[in-house]
Amino acid sequence: MNDKKIGIQIKKARAEAQLTQSNLGNKIGVTWEMISRYENGKSSPRKNLEQIAKILGKPIQYFFGVEELPISDEIRRLTDLLMKKGMDLQKGIEIQLIENIGEFSLNKALSYTKQTYSCPSWIYARYKKAFALKLDEIESDVVSITRGDIGYFSSEFNPRLGNYVIIKDGKKYRIDKYSKNIKGNISAVLIAIEKRYIKD
């Protein structure tokens, strides 16, 4: 908003408060001529706007033409909206959990498991065939894995260069970065790792 429009709002609020330009000027330490310049948009009132707002009993946004919704109410509304969105993102969806693969293939382990794990909704929204895997038996030189960590994977997502994938190499599984020269059978693409710090 330009200074002329702010000046119009100052003049309007000053009239409502039944103050003269001299009265207002004295209260903020400027001359009545300066108040006149503010009101006519000839000088910028922005450096004194907080003081003017306080004296005239108006929220600062009033001078920018925002009367309908005070800033504190708008902030509260946006905060509530963000909190709700955050809660929605944190809500879990139950997906299959593989605790031990053993010598099975991932598909066979998935068909046998009866266990489930709460998956963040943002993962499930994007990857409908997501599953969780406890990473205790999985090796990796490219991602940090500690005991108890849970990996979220998708078997329906085709890997692209640079994605992390789980590979069966002989009888063991490992997580590696996907490339065209990768060795082993790619079983699924890694979506995320949930770090679980377990005390010994």
Image (cartoon, grey):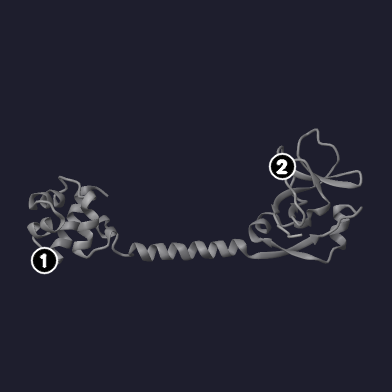
Which one is nearer the viewer's eye here, 115 or 122?
115
Residue 64 placement: quadrant:
bottom left
Query: Which disc, if any, is residue 18?
Result: 1
The mark total stands at 2
Residue at left offset 15%, top offset 50%: 38
Q: Is disc 1 surrounded by few (<14), some (14 to 19) or many (20+) residues within 10 Å?
A: few
Counting from the top left corner in percent of width and height, residue 49 is at 23, 54
**Disc 2 on helix, strand or loop?**
loop
Taking the image as shown, residue 170 lies to the left or right of residue 179, namely right
Which one is nearer the viewer's eye here, 72 or 179?
72
Counting from the top left corner in percent of width and height, residue 142 is at 74, 41
Query: Which disc, if any, is residue 171?
Result: none
Callout 2 amino acid = Asn
Extreme residue toward the top, this view: 181
Residue 102 placement: quadrant:
bottom right
Callout 1 amino acid = Gln
Residue at left offset 13%, top offset 59%: 27
Which one is nearer the viewer's eye here, 193 or 159?
193
Image quarter where the C terminus lies is: bottom right
Residue at left offset 25%, top offset 56%: 50
Q: Is disc 2 surrounded by few (<14), some (14 to 19) or many (20+) residues within 10 Å?
A: some
Query: Which numbered disc flags the more N-terminal residue, 1 or 2?
Result: 1
- According to the picture, the residue beneath numbered tag 2 turns out to be 163
